[in-house]
Amino acid sequence: QVQLVESGGGLVQAGGSLRLSCAASGSIFSINRMGWYRQAPGKQRELVATIASDGMTNYADSVKGRFTISRDNAKYTACLQMNSLRPEDTAVYYCNVVSWSLMPYWGKGTLVTVSS
């Protein structure tokens, strides 16, 4: 089992920045891929960014050039630096990890609100 705790959400004006963090605990040696997803009101959960154990990253087109995902394999944390935020980035952001056996784990989410 892997437990995930997100932090760093909040209210920011359009054009501003926020940094989300995700701390993993438990069976951390089983972690392969780490990532962030988001769910806006009335919409399905969508991928924001992922980072593999070798550092390879993947981003949704809507956040490319604005968001940066990183991970610290020694501390088992993943961060999402979000710049040039837009009102459409408003959502609950969820940390996700996938184990080497392809088991997914989710955090409880952190709310990001971008005002216009």
Image: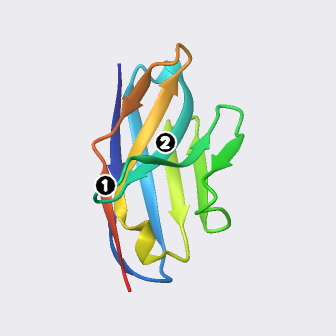
Would you identify the image quadrant in which residue 43 lies? bottom left
Say if 15 sits above or below 5 in the image: below
53 over 12 or under it: above or below: above
Separation of disc 2 and disc 1 at Cα?
15 Å
- The residue tagged 2 is 77
Q: Give residue 110's mark.
A: 1
Q: Quadrant of the C terminus?
A: bottom left
Which residue is painted at 59% across and 63% down in the image?
Answer: 63
How many numbered marks are there? Answer: 2
Residue at point 41%, 43% (across, down) = 95
Give above or below for 39 relative to 88: above
In the rendered structure, which amino acid carries the disc numbered 2?
A: Thr
Q: Answer yes or no: is residue 46 visible.
A: yes
Q: Position of residue 37 (x, y in %)?
A: 45, 47
Does 44 sit above or below residue 76? Answer: below
Q: Amino acid at mark 1?
A: Thr
Q: Nearer the viewer, residue 89 or 16?
A: 89
Tag 1 secondary structure: strand
Q: Secondary structure at mark 2?
A: strand
